[in-house]
C-alpha cells in the first residue's frame, strides 16, 4: 500500500491565478493561517480548495454518496468527517459512527420502554444465523468490550439510517472485521442508496503519531473536551511552582478554568491497543486490494525530504513546550518542530487535519464529481 503525497503548498508564482486569488503575499511570503482558529480555517479552505468546494456543493444539491472511513484507531476519522461537514454544509452530511451507535444502543437497553421498542424492532427485522434468543442474550449480557455480531450491527445500522433523511454518509467504524468488508460492498443497496457512488477513504497515520496522541491526551472532567498537552494545548496554561508542573485549563467559560486531566491508562500510549492496530492495518490492506470500489488514499505524515515542496509550514503539527517566566510570573508557550518516524522508519512530520481534508476535497471533486 503506497499512499501518495498531495501538494497543498500555496504556489507563490501562481498567487495571481484564480486558485489562490485571495492569498496575499506578505513580504515575499505566503499568507499564514492559524488552523486551530475556526474563522481562519474557513478562509484557508476557501483559498486552498475554493473551486473544489463549489463542485462538491453543486453535486450535493441533487445527489449524495456513501464514504467509508478506514484507518487505525485514533487516526482522526471523526475529526476529518466533522471538518468536511463544517465546510460543505452540515445539513447535507451525516457522520455516522458505529461506535456512537452502539453506545446509544447501550443507553436504550438501560431504559425499560426503549429496550422493549428495540427488541420489538429486532423481532420484526433481524435476519441471520444466530438464533434470536441468543441475540437478545448478547444484548443483555454484553459489556462494552465484546463485539456484536455482524448480522446485528447491520440491522442496527439500517434502523439508524432509516431514521435520518437521505444525506451523504461518512461511515466510521464499518467495516471493522474482515468479514464485514464483503458486506460493505453491497451496503449502499441495503440501505437504499443504490444509485449513489460509494467510496473507501483510507487514512494512513503512523503508529508513533497515534502513540503520542494517546500519551499526551488531556480531557476536561466537566465538558469532556479532549486536547493534547504536547500537540494541541488549550489557550490557558497553569504553572504549579510546588510541583514544577504545567496544566492545561479548559477554555470553555462554563468550566471555570478547571484542569484537563489524563485518562487512566493513557500514559501507556498504543501499548494496550497494539493488537487492534494490527487488525486495523490488515483491514486497510484488504480494502485496498478490493476490485471495483473506488478509493481515496490520505496520509497524515510526510517524509522530511518532501516537506518543502509539498506543504506550507503552518500545515504541519508543531510541538508545544511551556516555560515559566519567573520575572513576569507567566507561562510562555513556545512552538517547535515535531519530528516522528513513520511506520517505514522515515523521519517525517505530521500534518494538521485541515491539509488532509483539502486533499480529500480535491480528490472527491476532481475524480468523482466533475465528470
Ligand atoms: Zn471543560
Image (tube, helix red, strand yellow):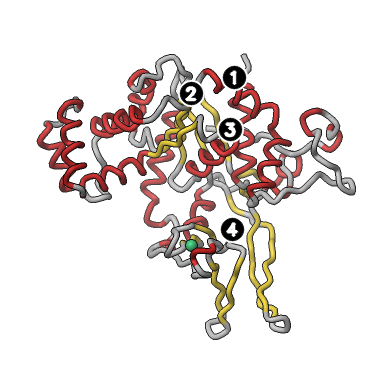
Q: Which element is circle 1 on?
A: helix
Q: Which element is circle 3 on?
A: helix
Residue at x 70% of width, y 41% of height = 44
Residue at x 37% of width, y 34% of height = 174
Q: Name above or below for residue 109 compared with residue 370.
A: below
Residue 231 is labelled as 4
Mark 1 and mark 2 in contact (Cβ < 8 Å)?
Answer: no
Residue at x 49% of width, y 32% of height = 93
Whole-angstrom CA distance, mark 2 to mark 4, is 33 Å
Q: Which element is circle 4 on?
A: loop
Sequence-first disc among 1 and 4: 4
Sequence-first disc among 2 and 3: 2
Quadrant of the rendered image containing residue 247 = bottom right
Sequence-first disc among 4 and 3: 3
* Residue 184 position in % (x across, y down): 37, 26
Q: Residues within 10 Å of mark 1 (few under 14, many from 20)?
A: some
Residue assigned mark 3? 88
Sequence-first disc among 2 and 4: 2
Camera-nearest label, 1 or 3? 3
Q: Name above or below for residue 249 compared with residue 319.
A: below
- Give the position of the C terminus as an image quadrant: top right
Q: How crowded is mark 3: few (under 14 residues within 10 Å), some or many (20 or more)?
A: some
Amino acid at each position: 500500500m503506497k499512499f501518495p503525497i498531495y501538494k497543498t503548498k500555496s504556489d507563490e508564482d501562481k498567487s495571481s491565478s484564480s486558485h489562490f486569488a485571495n492569498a496575499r503575499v506578505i513580504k515575499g511570503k505566503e499568507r499564514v493561517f492559524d488552523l486551530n482558529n475556526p474563522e481562519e480555517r474557513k478562509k484557508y479552505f476557501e483559498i486552498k480548495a475554493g473551486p473544489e468546494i463549489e463542485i462538491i456543493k453543486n453535486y450535493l444539491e441533487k445527489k449524495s454518496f456513501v464514504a467509508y472511513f478506514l484507518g487505525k484507531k485514533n487516526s482522526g476519522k471523526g475529526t476529518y468527517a466533522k471538518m468536511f461537514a463544517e465546510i460543505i454544509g452540515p445539513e447535507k452530511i451525516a457522520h455516522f459512527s458505529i461506535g456512537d451507535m452502539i453506545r446509544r444502543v447501550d443507553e436504550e437497553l438501560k431504559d425499560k420502554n426503549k429496550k422493549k421498542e428495540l427488541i420489538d424492532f429486532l423481532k420484526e427485522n433481524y435476519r441471520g444465523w444466530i438464533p434470536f434468543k441468543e441475540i437478545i442474550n448478547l444484548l443483555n449480557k454484553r459489556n462494552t468490550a465484546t463485539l456484536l455480531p455482524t448480522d446485528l450491527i447491520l440491522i442496527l445500522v439500517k434502523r439508524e439510517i432509516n431514521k435520518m433523511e437521505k444525506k451523504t454518509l461518512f461511515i466510521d467504524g464499518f467495516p471493522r472485521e474482515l468479514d464485514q468488508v464483503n458486506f460493505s460492498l453491497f451496503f449502499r443497496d441495503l440501505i437504499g442508496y443504490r444509485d449513489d457512488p460509494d467510496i473507501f477513504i483510507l487514512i494512513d497515520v503512523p503508529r508513533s503519531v497515534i502513540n503520542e496522541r494517546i500519551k499526551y491526551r488531556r480531557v476536561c472532567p466537566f465538558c469532556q473536551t479532549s486536547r493534547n498537552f504536547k500537540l494541541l494545548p488549550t489557550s490557558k496554561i497553569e504553572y504549579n511552582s510546588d510541583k514544577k508542573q504545567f496544566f492545561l485549563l479548559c477554555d470553555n467559560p462554563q468550566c471555570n478554568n478547571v484542569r484537563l486531566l489524563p485518562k487512566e491508562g493513557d500514559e501507556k500510549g498504543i501499548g494496550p491497543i497494539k493488537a487492534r492496530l494490527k487488525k486495523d492495518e490488515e483491514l486497510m490492506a484488504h480494502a485496498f486490494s478490493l476490485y471495483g470500489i473506488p478509493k481515496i488514499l490520505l496520509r497524515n505524515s510526510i517524509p522530511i525530504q518532501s516537506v518543502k515542496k509539498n506543504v506550507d509550514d503552518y500545515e504541519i503539527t508543531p510541538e508545544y513546550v511551556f516555560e515559566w517566566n519567573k520575572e513576569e510570573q507567566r507561562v510562555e508557550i513556545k512552538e517547535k518542530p515535531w519530528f516522528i518516524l513513520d511506520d517505514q522508519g522515515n523521519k517525517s512530520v505530521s500534518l494538521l487535519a485541515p491539509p488532509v481534508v483539502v486533499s480529500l476535497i480535491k480528490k472527491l471533486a476532481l475524480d468523482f464529481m466533475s465528470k
